[in-house]
Image: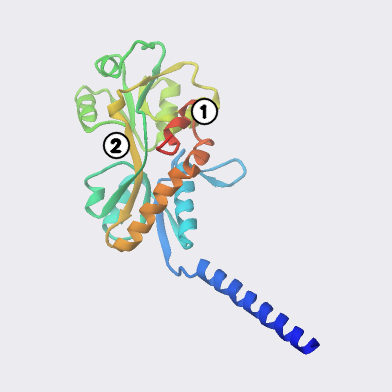
Amino acid sequence: MLNLLLSVLFILFTSQTVLAQDSILQRNTCEKRYVISFQGDAPGFFVDKNNKKSGTAYELLLEIIRRLGCKSTEQVNSYLTARENMSRNKIDIYALGTPDDKFEKSAEFVEMYRIPRTLVISKKLADKNSTIDSILNNPQVNIGNVIEGRLFIKETEQAELRAKHRLREYPGPELVFKALLDGRIQATFSSPAFTYYFLTRENKMKKFISIPDREEEAIISGFHLSRKRLSEQERTSIKKIIKEIRQDGTLAKIATKYVNPEDLKYYQPEDQ
């Protein structure tokens, strides 16, 4: 009887061990190492005061990789370099970007969320009744932008401002906002995350006002997925994960660290 009992316990223990090992193997069967790319500029990516990597793009990319159950190699690039690397099949996933015909020659764009475009301008030159169109037509206002940046400003606006010698371009957003704070430019296009990171969290918004654009001018933000490095099945899986990240509240949870509370509505699940 004792031998029979020991035999049963041995079988049960062995079965549970095999099941546990199978479960571990299933969670770690991904042998692919994805190459993820992002710009080395806040708020998309930065190293915080505790020497921890942070940022909206960075956290979202890591969440995708975590849900895929795979490993990743990080590439920190400028936007133009990332676009070039994508065309040369050196990147699997890029974030965060906007629809771009040149990028989409070699990548599929997948929307993550839509946020309002705003123009941050000195209170000396605008008030709550001002409009973006009136500011763009004001010869006293020089507008700052990232070199070749298309995240917030339109190509037509860039062309018009250049023709009037009123566009000031800088290598990255940090220098754009520094020029704004120093008075070398009077305005720049922005978004909730950029305004929060460079102005609000530093208590430097008092001298400025944020003018919202028309609702139809919302900024579409998302990911570029390589058409050649990723199979159709892989892209389908990643697109499903991107949708889940928004719908299960993970996007909003991440956004709480990077935007003002009143702007969280843009990052909530779509059915809310």
In this view, the residue farthest toward the front is 1
Measuring from the top left, give residue 250's x and y in whole percent: 50, 44
Choose the circle earlier in sequence order: 2 or 1.
2
Q: Assign a secondary structure to mark 2.
A: loop
- Specify whether residue 57 is in view: no
Kindly tell me whether residue 150 is visible in this rendering: yes
In this rendered view, identify the residue nearer to me: 94 or 187.
94
Question: Total marks drawn?
Answer: 2
Q: Residues within 10 Å of mark 2 (few under 14, many from 20)?
A: some
Whole-percent x, y for residue 195 in the image: 45, 28
Which is more toward the observer, 212 or 4? 4
Report which residue position mark 2 lands on: 150
Q: CA distance from mark 2 to mark 1?
A: 26 Å
Position of 71 relative to 245 (above/below): below
Along the line of sight, the residue nearer the viewer: 137 or 169: 137
Indicate the quadrant where residue 149 lies: top left
Q: Nearer the viewer, mark 2 or mark 1?
A: 1
What residue is shown at x 40% (from left), y 16% (from top)?
122
Q: Position of residue 138 (x, y in %)?
A: 27, 14
Q: Position of residue 79 (x, y in %)?
A: 34, 45
Type of the residue with mark 1: Pro
**Callout 1 crowding tier (Cα within 10 Å): few <14, some 14–19, many ≥20:** few
Q: Which residue is mark 1?
A: 261
The quarter holding residue 268 reads: top left
Closer-to-camera residue (234/85): 234
Q: Amino acid at mark 2?
A: Arg
Position of 250 relative to 11 (above/below): above
**Vertically, is 111 above or below 156?**
below
- Is residue 243 rendered to the left or right of residue 102? right
Circle 1: element type? helix
Residue plotted at (36% across, 12% down): 126
